[in-house]
Image (spheres, rainbow, N blue to C red):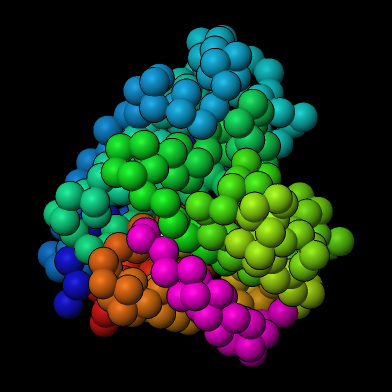
Amino acid sequence: MASVLVVMGETIARYGFPEGHPFGVDRHDAFARQFEARGFDGRVRVAPPVPAEAGELLLFHTPLYVDFVRERSASGQGCLDGGDTPAFRGVYEASASVVGATLVAARALMAGAASRAFVPIAGLHHAARDHAAGFCVFNDIGVAIEVLRREYGLTRIAYVDIDAHHGDGVFYAFEADPQVIFADIHEDGRTLYPGTGAADEVGKGAAVGAKLNLPVPAGADDATFNAVWPRVLAFVEAASPEFIILQCGADSIAGDPITHLRFTPAAHGRAARDLAGLADRLGHGRVLALGGGGYDRANLAAAWNNVVEGLAGE
């Protein structure tokens, strides 16, 4: 069994929005209960989150935006975007903890303390450098990519996204950056937020061809996933990345209240298992999986624990 680290705990559990919001604070515990029931707490290493420092947030986000979040966090009033992402007291600290959890995991992989890692409340792929969007305040993925490049000198980082929503905050931040290999299977933007990620969005400038968007129609199931997934694997393998990030949002599973795909948790297990195998073939073994979206609690618990199982090679 591969060495797997799961970063989880109270500080990232606090990342959630007021009662009635799809992204509630109960998502972490829904994962944790099944994690314990399946006996993973005795088979993988668990570490607590450590909040990201302001200087780490600024590797990706603008100073004006970080200050704005801090101000709204103190007041707990208003929204951080057009209405999807409400402010609450402590939102800055909770959001910084999500980023910090992802950095704990990324640094552990780079130090060789584990070969794979998973963070349940993470993968906030809609946040842009200068604004919140789609329930996402700080983009932990973007910060992690910058840390991996600046601290460790990596030049080929793969980002794979199977959340129902297009990972627009990651895509557009690195659209012209050839060092970020981007592959995203998502519900067609004509039927789901954020409305982006068309197949002809393949990167810009020196990054043309380093981005793969695979929109699938509403109602797409595991047969569709299994048909397109080999394209993702081949695309990523051809780039020989030094580090692989998987955003494994569970809102692509049948029954999610705000999306229209019909995958099963088996797709998430396959994605984790296949990427772990690819990372081993590339000689480094490093895969960092992030929970992303998912608003049916049973779905996210099953999918994310399947990801842990797949990362472990079980």
Q: Does any portion of residue 231 appear in the rendered image?
A: yes
**Label total for image:** 0
Q: Quadrant of the C terminus?
A: bottom left
24 or 138, nearer to the observer: 138
Q: Does any portion of residue 34 appear in the rendered image?
A: no
193 or 156, nearer to the observer: 156
The magenta segment is 220-243
Q: Is 8 one of the magenta-colored residues?
A: no
Q: Residue at x 16, y 56 (%)?
A: 112
Instruction: Answer with left or right where residue 244 lies relative to residue 18.
Output: left
Depicted 233 relative to depicted 36: above or below? below
Q: Is 234 one of the magenta-colored residues?
A: yes
8 or 239, nearer to the observer: 239
Residue 33 occupies quadrant: bottom left
Q: Residue at x 61, y 62 (%)?
A: 210
Chief secondary structure of the magenta span?
helix
Residue 40: percent from left, percent from top: 22, 67
Residue 247: percent from left, percent from top: 50, 58
Instruction: Answer with left or right where residue 38 lies relative to residue 191.
Output: left
Q: Residue at x 74, y 74 (%)?
A: 216
Residue 7: percent from left, percent from top: 28, 49
Residue 259: percent from left, percent from top: 71, 62
Q: Residue at x 56, y 32 (%)?
A: 137
Instruction: Answer with left or right where residue 46 lies relative to residue 156.
Output: left
Residue that sits furthest to the front in the current view: 206
Depicted 84 relative to depicted 159: above or below? above
